[in-house]
Image (cartoon, rainbow, N blue to C red):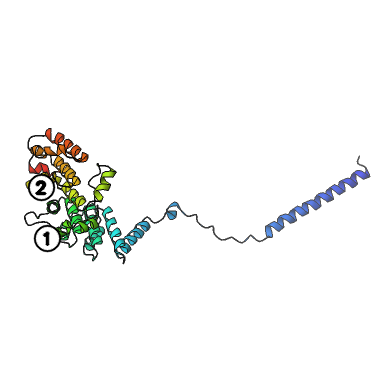
Amino acid sequence: MKTKQDWTACRWELCLGGIMGVLSVAGTCALAQSPSPAPGPPQARQPTDNAAEPNPQAPVEKAWGILREGMKDNSADKRAMAVRALGLLPGNTEAEKAAINALQDKKPNVRMAAAAALGSMQAQHANLELEGALQDSEPAVVLAAANSLLLLHDHVGYDVYYDVLTGERRAGKGLIKEQLDTLKDKKKMAKMGFEEGIGFIPFAGMGYEAVKTVTKNDSSPVRAAAAKQLAHDPDPGTAKALVKATTDKNWSVRAAALEAIAQREDRSLVPQIAAALDDEKDVVRFTAAACIVHLSVLPAKKNSADIAKP
């Protein structure tokens, strides 16, 4: 039987429970009646991988802009550099047209760069323009055009190199008299420079000291380079010119002529160059020896068509 104290404690527990229940209900109601938070701004969409990639055309457009500006620059040297760089664009119509237009530039170094670029880019439709450049008043431009014509398998270029090597015109072709006179002028030839208008160093196998010596001479670098360019000329008269060049007073021309004869692969020329085995210059003597060994193991005769193959 519960005592009075037990009933008192029970009433307090019931009262406290009621108070806690009321507070719980009030809290629930307050939460239910409170306004919902305002919706925030929509989340920005994350960029996709494609949107983050740069425009692939942007560098190309910038590159062409640089080339076009360079070709219009007031500085002839800058125009020449920009035009020469077009040689790295084979099969590009705009590059070919730009180089052809540059053949008409008022400055010879730009015209020379244009002629060289057309050969480097293998501009198969520029033969007529390059042949026209063979009549340029500057020999350096003529040589660059001749070299490019050979790169395009146009044998007209051989006429120019024959003129350079022999100092004579061949069958009414090649350089005009004024141009040949320039090539005979030692001061002008020295000014033209070792590689200018040719586009290659003809003595890569001779060593640095030999090349240094060659560059100090007058017209010998250009004449030696011309001899090497004639290696595959099918004209029979060129073989005679090369044999004669093996006795040239300049050793670099003699060595280059022997290299060209070796590449022509005409065994019948061996007796005509045997004297070169006693040349006072080591490089000429070694080149002659290698040339004769090479030719001696070949068939007795090769026709012009075979000789013309590079």
Residue 92 is situated, as x and y percent measured from the top left of the image, at 25, 56
Mark positioned earlier in the residue sequence (2 or 1): 1
Residue at the right extreme of this rendering: 4
Q: Which mark is residue 241?
A: 2
- Please, what is the three-letter code of the amino acid marked with disc 2? Ala
Query: Visible in this render: residue 221?
Result: yes
Quadrant occupied by the C terminus? top left
Q: CA distance from mark 2 to mark 1?
A: 19 Å
Q: Which residue is mark 1?
A: 177
Residue 231 is situated, as x and y percent measured from the top left of the image, at 15, 45
* Residue in the image at 15% along x and 34% along y: 293
Residue 117 placement: quadrant: bottom left
The relative height of residue 111 versus residue 211 in the rendered view (above or below) is below
* Residue in the image at 15% along x and 35% along y: 294
* Residue in the image at 27% along x and 42% along y: 207
Query: Which of these two is toward me, 146 or 86?
Result: 146
Query: Which of these two is toward me, 139 or 17?
Result: 139
